[in-house]
Amino acid sequence: MTDGRHSAAGKALTDLIIEVFRLNGRLLISGDRLTAGLGLTSARWQVLGAIHLAGSPQSVAWIARSMGLNRQGVQRIVNELASESLLEFRTNPHHRRARLVVLMRKGKAAYAAIERAQIPWVNALSKGLRADDIHAVTALVGALRNRLEDDLEAGERDDEA
């Protein structure tokens, strides 16, 4: 039984979580501004990026899982991007119903244009910050994400039992 108070690390992590929520909101707003001239949004950028970074065709479920988002939301965005000829669906040899998502020429061009806009933006944002500090925060956030993923997987196993 606990006494209902945060440990020092628990309080620090709660503060970090709140800042990450705030940061996420600001990143979405900034991303929407950055991509608006391209007719995109942060959400569309995120999906295009996940497809690009995957390096090979992936299913919507895999893309959603890699982004930590729900499949239905990613499916909606993927369908919109497909209707605008930014990506297309291909047959999945390993699964009849879970088609693979592939960037088309227009999607690759859109992602390249986003990168051209993102680079000066992120360079300006990072001014005065130390790369070592950024790497440390990235490692911490990655470790927390891994713990949460492990917890979710354990919960799914428990639900199946």
Image (cartoon, rainbow, N blue to C red):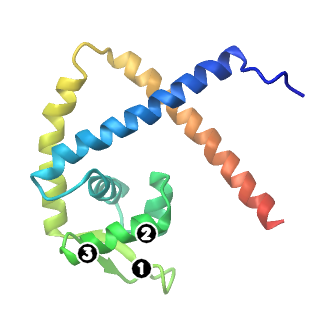
161 displayed left or right of 30: right
Tell me the kind of residue under disc 1. Arg
35 displayed left or right of 59: left
Point out which mark residue 82 bears.
3
Can you say whether 53 is above or below 23 in the image? below
> Which is more N-terminal, label 1 or label 2?
2
Tell me the kind of residue under disc 2. Val
Q: Position of residue 33 (x, y in %)?
A: 18, 44
Quarter of the image for the C terminus: give it.
bottom right
Secondary structure, mark 2, is: helix
Q: Is residue 63 among what the camera can see?
A: yes
Q: Position of residue 116 (x, y in %)?
A: 12, 43
Q: Is residue 140 among what the camera can see?
A: no
13 displayed left or right of 47: right
- Picture residue at 34% right of the left edge, 80% below the top: 90
Quarter of the image for the N terminus: give it.
top right
Q: Position of residue 57 (x, y in %)?
A: 36, 68
- Picture residue at 68% right of the left edge, 14% below the top: 8
Judging depth in this view, the residue of 91 and 134 nearest the camera is 134
Q: CA distance from mark 3 to mark 2?
A: 12 Å
Secondary structure, mark 3, is: helix
Secondary structure, mark 1, is: loop
- Picture residue at 27% right of the left edge, 72% below the top: 80
12 displayed left or right of 36: right
Q: Which residue is mark 2?
A: 60
Q: Which residue is mark 1?
A: 99
> Which is more N-terminal, label 2 or label 3?
2
Q: CA distance from mark 2 to mark 1?
A: 8 Å
- Picture residue at 18% right of the left edge, 39% below the top: 118
Contact, mark 2 vs mark 1 (Cβ under 8 Å)? yes
Tell me the kind of residue under disc 3. Ala
Q: Position of residue 91 (x, y in %)?
A: 38, 84
